[in-house]
Image: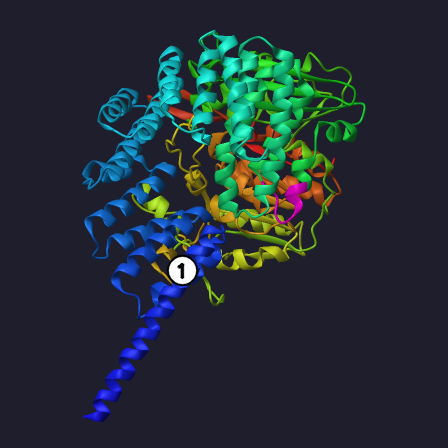
Amino acid sequence: MARFALSLILSLLWCSLGNASVYQTMGRARNLASQNRYTDAVRALDSVINSPHSRTSLLFEAYDSRARCHKKSGNYSAALADYDAALGIDASELNRAIVSLNKTDLLIQTGQYSEAEKILNDLPCHNQDTKNRRITNLASVYTRTERFQQAENLYKTAISEFSDSTDKAIICHNLGVLYMQQGKWAEASRQLSIADSLYGRLTAEKFISLSNLALSEAFSHNCELAIMHIDTALSGLARIVNLSHPDLIIMRRKKAEILLACGNTEKAKEEFREYFNLNRQNIISAFEGMSVQNRLDFWKKEKPLLSLAFGLENSYPELLFDVALFRRGISMPAKGAEFKSILNYNGRDIRNRLSKKDAAVDFVVYPKRDSSGKLESHMGAIVATKKNIRFVPLGLVSEIENHIVNGIRLKTAISCGRADHIDAVYSDSSLTQKIWMPVLGWLDNIDRLFFVPDGIFNLLAIEHLPGLPADIRIHRLTNLVNLLSEKRSSTPRDFLLAGGFDYDGLPDSAIENILPNHNAADFLRDNIREISFSTLPGMKAEVDTIFRFMPHAEHTYQLSEEYLKHNCGKYGGMHISTHGYTLHLDDDKGNYILSDSISADRSLLASGLALSGANNAHRHSDREDGLLSARELCDMDMRNIGFVVLSACQTADGKVSDEGPAGLVRGFKIAGAGTIIATLWEVNDEAAMRFMTMFYKLTALGKSKSEAFRLAQDYLRGYCIEEPEIIEEYDPAIQSSRIIETGNTVVSYPFASQSMWAPFILIDNTDI
């Protein structure tokens, strides 16, 4: 009996000590999270969750806390999984409602509006706080899905029901922002004025609301009051936060907008310059500790804000060149510490690099307000030479996208995949006049033109349009800063030459301790019925032929995703001949008013390459899924790879935004790869093989990549086949037709049409 009692006491003591340790760990996790040390906080919370001493209530809190840490770290899938784990634990209805609201915050942030709306519609509210959050989040869903009337009705209901003045102030402010989004400036001013009167204390929220009121007043043509209010907001917020605080920087941008709207361009230039300088340093500082996903999300937030500066147009081209270069650096962040130097380059650095016969053109899509204050997307070009710089407006983006070619819109013609439409696009000299002539009109006596595309130009080989001067060599870049980078080896010593994969059989996998990533397969299965790629003999024949000109390359018919992820760093170049894919899916529409909340860019999952075993690997949880998505490429390190050839369909395609297609090219560039050859649409197998064969033959003979690329295209266009002329002739004797050879020959050019030779584009080749 005494032995049993002693055992019981020891057991209780052990449990007591275990519980104390778990609670201490939970407290440490809270402190770490408050210091923004989210990775360390997650480790501590892992211990709590895996401890046998964690009670149900503590486990519930730990999952919720870990989800919030994952969210802050940009690991959204892990955060959603933890919220679901917490909701699977027995807890009070109030606590479950709070976690459900936390989950909807993340769903809204990542653009998963329908799922968030379903949760919010079914959510019971147990107190005023949860009721307020539910209404605010549901109205946010309505706003982001452009159901403005429903959002407005919800906000008005909340105003009538909320008793707390601060809560009412927040709702009035949100309603005012909703009106701003619709260009209803008078209604916005009215609600924001009410919000200003309801905020009791001089808080940051009050001054942010006042800055939005000033913006609304400016577009209601009440400039004197707008400038007074924005100055009050700026001075008030400056007393609360430090001068580098993001809210204060955003407010400076609003003042620049107000000055521009009120016709004071000179002062607007000063404010935009100050805003840009402060924001540049703030972003560089923030980027240093960010993950790849954080950077992608951060850019989605910052992009439209920075782009507003282009409304200055030709009144300040020097500043706009700096802004354009900075935008490019954010959109494709470099690996390691290199991003600092890239983000600090400016237009002067580029112009110093140019020779007297060079020109650099950065096309930009930018928001510009019309006379009513409504934002519309415009296209412009920053044209720079060694001596001069100019901003050239090209008009509304919609006018370019709606340009009629072959009876349909340009945007439809370049994305539908039909050869007749593609041929019509690249035969349309009026398109050349619309895009290039305003730019070339400012240039004289140049030999080389480097350009960076934007918007629809990313999916259009504008360098192949008809009527361009034959004596100017035009080179496509992803960032003009690449002109300043060190030259990489033009003939990489360690070259991977892979193609002709078996997509059904599972490849050998010798990589141990891997954490398989099935996000690409999950994304495809969510959006298409099945994953199925067919083996094409032309792919194997292509790499076999190229191998004749690169006998030192590593030549293989098998390339597993595991192998490529773990060994890409040892190669100096690679040619991958396989299937590429891009799904064109609708995405949430960006809005600069709502851009204070980031959203995950899932569009990078919509593009990828099929590697060995892609049809079946996703069925095995212990291996990679055989699909290398553009998003996965972002996490790889390819800084050693100077040259990549993506011999597949649509490898330059992707959902287009200001920074270019969210596809394979962006993934490879973020990974650090150098020059890339990619394709804009589905490529004819024989045309691809002949183009690639000639390209490698010419480089083996010592031609530069740009010269070999141009000559390979010329070869493809001029490739001819001579065949005997055959005619069909009716013979009365046999009362039937018969085939007769005339003795003559007929010459045909099977690859002369633009749809055959124009899909190939050469990107970021500075070895000229």
What percent of the width, then of the height, locates residue 267?
Answer: 63, 15
State yes or no: residue 338 in magenta: yes
Quarter of the image holding residue 129? top left
Name the residue located 66 percent from the left edge and 42 percent from the top edge: 340
State yes or no: residue 295 in magenta: no
The answer to whether residue 19 of the structure is visible from this angle is yes
Q: Nearer the viewer, residue 743 or 41?
A: 41
Predominant SS of the magenta segment: loop
Image quadrant in which the N terminus is located: bottom left
How many residues crowd around disc 1 within 10 Å: few (fewer than 14), some, or many (20 or more)? some
Name the residue located 66 percent from the left edge and 45 percent from the top edge: 338
Could you say whether the residue bearing mark 1 is in a helix, strand or loop? Answer: helix
Q: Is residue 392 above or below residue 116?
A: above
What percent of the width, then of the height, locates residue 676?
Answer: 61, 40
- Amino acid type, callout 1: Gly
What percent of the width, then of the height, locates residue 393?
Answer: 59, 14
Q: Is residue 424 above or below residue 458?
A: above
Magenta region = 333-340
Q: Residue furthest right?
A: 356
Q: Nearer the viewer, residue 221 or 208?
A: 208
To which residue does mark 1 refer? 27
Image quadrant in which the C terminus is located: top right
